[in-house]
Amino acid sequence: MTIDWDHFTPTLSLAGGLLLGLAAAAFILVNGRILGISGIVGGLSAAVRGRADRSDLGWRLAFLVGLLVSPLAAKTLAAAGLWPADVPAAPRIAAGTLAIVAAGLLVGYGTRLGSGCTSGHGVCGLSRLSPRSLVATLVFMGAGFVTVFVLRHVV
């Protein structure tokens, strides 16, 4: 196994992990809710269809808009020279559109099947010592390891 040293960013990864952990902790302390993307999207969908409390609509929509706008803001900052030079401005995905769509659909199906997503189980659930989240995290991490191994060494 080799490491792509040009794109190995342990300091930035640690900082990102700390920010995510702080955001998840603040979200649960302030709102009493889990910071899981599938739950936020599911609640937004239910509120729009009239199957859930519409008072949650505003913050759910704002959260998702923030997720979508953040990469555009980073790209704009990078173009203006305000983004650090050693930070990639955009991720490179070595897959075609069909593979990305299929992966998205499989992830969506998995979050419904597992009653939550990686952020809900892996960040928030594990920090609350949830046994269900531990099992879910082990399953999706194991599936990811197996998938990468098969795609890189078998296929």
Image: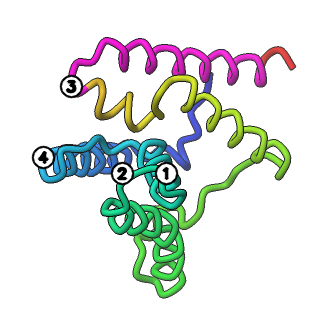
Indicate the secondary structure of the residue bearing disc 1.
Answer: helix
- What is the x, y in percent for residue 14? 31, 43
Point out the image quarter for the N terminus: top right
* Of the image marks 1 and 2, the number of the one nearer the N terminus: 2
The amino acid pointed to by label 2 is Leu
Name the residue tied to disc 2: 12
Residue type at mark 3 is Arg
Query: Secondary structure under badge 4?
Result: helix
The residue lying at 38 percent from left, 28 percent from top is 121
The Cα atoms of the two marked residues, 4 and 2, are separated by 25 Å
- Of pointers 4 and 2, the one earlier in the residue sequence: 2
Disc 1/disc 4 C-alpha distance (Å): 24 Å
Pointer 2 local density, CA inside 10 Å: few below 14, some 14–19, many at least 20:
few
Badge 1 or badge 3: first in the primary sequence: 1
Return the residue at label 3.
Answer: 128
- Check disc 3: other Cα within 10 Å, few if <14, some if 14-19, many if 20+: few
Q: Which residues are magenta?
A: 127-152
Residue 74 as seen in the image, left or right of residue 22: right
Q: Which residue is mark 4?
A: 29
Circle nearer the viewer, 1 or 3? 1
